[in-house]
Image (spheres, coloured by chain):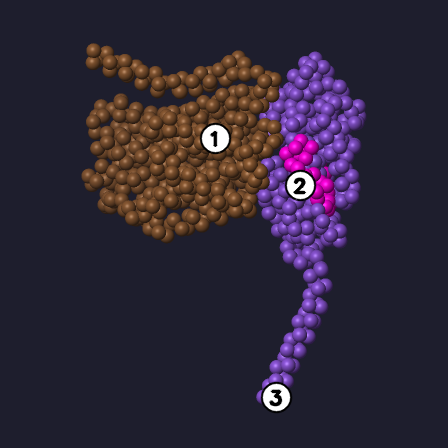
Chain colours: A brown, B purple
Amino acid sequence: MEHFLAAFANLLTPVPFLHVLMGTAAGVFVGAVPGLTGGMLIALTLPLTFYMDSTLAMIMLVGMYVGSVAGGLISATLLRMPGTPSSIMTTFDGYPMARDGRPERALGIGIGASFVGGITAGVILALLSPPLSRWATTFGPWEYFTMTLMAVVLIASLSQGSMMKGLLSGVLGMLVAMPGLNPADGQLRLTFGFHTLDAGFKLLPVLLGVFVMSQVIKEAVNILNRPERVTMGQASVFLRLSEWRRHWVNLLRSSVIGTFIGILPGVGSSISSMVCYATAKGTSKNPEVFGTGSEEGIVASEAGNNANVGGALVPLVTMGIPGSPIDAILLGALILHNLQPGPLLFINNPDIVWAMIDSYLLANVLMLIIMLFAVRIIAKVMYIDRVFLLPTIFVFCMVGSYSLGSSFFDAAAVIGFGILGYCLERAKIPLGPFVIGFVLAPILERELRSGLMLSDGSYLPIVTRPLALIFVSVSVALLLYPVITEKWRKRRNAAKQA
Amino acid sequence: MRSDRISRKGMILAGAVAIGLWMGLAVPVQAAFPEKPVKVIVPVKPGGTIDTVARIFQKTIDENKLLPVPMAVVNKPGAAGAVGTRTVKDSEPDGHTIVIFHSGVVTAAASGVTDFDHNHFEIIAKTGEMPMGLGTAKDSSLNTVADLISGAKETPGGAFKYATNIGLPVHFLPLMVADQAGIKFGPVQAGGGVNRLNSVVGGHTKFGVFSVLDFLKYDAAGLQPVVLFAPERHAKLPNVPTAKESGYDVSWVEMRMWLAPKGTPKDRVDILAKALGDAMKAPELLKTFGELGMDATFGDGDSVKADLDDRLKRVKHIVDTVDVQFKK
């Protein structure tokens, strides 16, 4: 508690406050511009923070994360185009409402829901993280190995599209993580004698390639597409508190579901908002309105995706395991700033951890203010011409990746991974699992090899250690679930026909 | 016409004289060293101790004009330092590209990660030392080296585990102790300092190797020093015995050293060494060293080479006799 308050007092001093504000504002704007995503912004900002104070860097990045997920709501509502992938569900009801002449109300509801989702998740984050990190210090290599395994399966099976494609993407990401120095025995592998590969593919070039360059290519290819848009009228985006009364159950439920889905390692905000949307629809009295401009739909989607951000920070700060693809970038940021992620982060760097948690709460408040008061301005400037945007982003990608290790190989890798990412997206293979696979493969390998060194080569601890057994069972169940339900459905269909 | 021709001839002559003079002047100027910024490769990420040390030297040397040219620090991280050190090894041996690193250059060579060791460089100097030692969890019953040895005797065959970062000095030091005690410790890969801390404090392994700075920093996290591999006790940890006091002849003081490509002229190496040595007298540099828990010891190239030769021999002995992992 004293850490919590001390960090908050520090956040309210001018310099840290400005960093959170800057991050949140940039996040909201980038989130709103179609084609620019939060992952892009954070990956591009990362190299700029190399020589910044670590705390300032982290709180700014957290602000960007919060802002970008919330900002996606604006373009989802006015353009039927999610500004960030996590706002897909909002387009289903936000755009119809806007088209029917109620864009202000749709935005107002979305903004309020985002805020409630964010704050709920922030409270859970602050309450849950300290005990969880204490518990996590007792985790050994086997617990980490099986938990990471579960994360990989989870993201593959929950990602958009087919599970096979999710798994494929995750495995591809893992393969990319293979070349270089093998952490477990200190030997080089799969470098084919090229010393530029001694360090393997570094995180930043892969992130910039997959998250940023692939989008640049995609936008450049579709440069002539212009979305339909709805312009905002004069009505207010401010809703009276009494108007929220009929939404509060949905608000709270979506916020809590969103947070806990966020805590599951590896799962991003898009999935959260989908689950919340489906739950709201399933329990609603008017499920038929969903998809045609339902306020409940907007509430569920926006509370869900914003709550996810806070939830996803839980495994990041307590165990060093990314809760979502964007958290993989934050994990990289911690490492770049020489802060070793893991359960001891709370003991060794309490100031940083609490600054991150508090900046998350602060960013949600700032997001609410920025969105409520600047939504009209953002709605105007988000149509910024991509002709000017794309070359600038391209240059930032090149400079950012080169600055990491003064190596042209890294810059070339960005372009390579950009092309790969673009091709994968064209083939409807999701990119989230790719990044998660890339980040988790070294953790998986390291923990497994450590575990085997501890047990002198025996795999038995996977079933003899209770937590490890639970994690593995969940993974297996997740893998088998779609197969079994498919079988049941076939059997039922066969029974019906007979 | 005539006057024209003369003047042209005169101009050619004057030009030739001028060029001759310029060349005459230029030759000694070119021989002066350094003539362009000295690039310091840091083979780790920005922010680590080596990076901090490199940057404080850069700042001190630039501010006090200890070299006529600026120093430029460039990070080339990767493969436990092998990427950056290799770049410098393969650079032009003119003294304008140098690298700062630690004794990992010896262990990486001995364990086969790199195909080069310190003999493939000209050693400029060492600037700063930090003793290493064994640490256990405070809540464990392991308080002395003798406790570790008897523990290993009770659970023989390498079942007594320690947290390590394979291929680096922290991997070999316990094996040296075990070699002398005639017992076996089992290495478990954990990674950098905090990961080893987590493994030891979390009770997954019995002990690990840490630096003096680690011991001071992670006291609150529950880490206790058991023994230091230093010639004498450390001022900041006066109660911790040295390995020699505990009956084991193992010494490994980690150092920050500067290397230039093989074939760099001796006089240039000396100019760089002098600049580094002078920088170590600056109060702001000594202050940073204090914060990093490093002893501000300076050593010239020859003494460092003898030291590294000895370390390479000791690590090779372990690789050949004890640790079978690296045998190909």
Q: Are marks 3 and 2 in contact (CB under 8 Å)?
A: no
The residue pinned by badge 1 equals A174
Magenta stretch in the rendered image: B107-130
In the image, A88: left or right of A168? Answer: left
Spot occupied by residue A74 in the image (x, y as percentages of width and height): 31, 41
Position of residue A323 relative to residue B17, above or below, is above
The residue pinned by badge 2 equals B101
Closest to the observer, B227 or A187: A187
For marks 3 and 1, give the one nearer the viewer: 3
Spot occupied by residue B142 in the image (x, y as percentages of width and height): 69, 19
Q: Amino acid at mark 2?
A: Phe
Mark 2 Cα-neighbour bin, 10 Å: few <14, some 14–19, many ≥20: many
Q: Are marks 2 and 1 in contact (CB under 8 Å)?
A: no
Report how far apart the C-alphas of labels 2 and 1 lie in the structure.
31 Å
Mark 1 Cα-neighbour bin, 10 Å: few <14, some 14–19, many ≥20: many
The residue pinned by badge 3 equals B2
Spot occupied by residue A138 in the image (x, y as percentages of width and height): 55, 20
Q: Amino acid at mark 3?
A: Arg
Note whether residue A257 is visible: yes
Q: Amino acid at mark 1?
A: Met
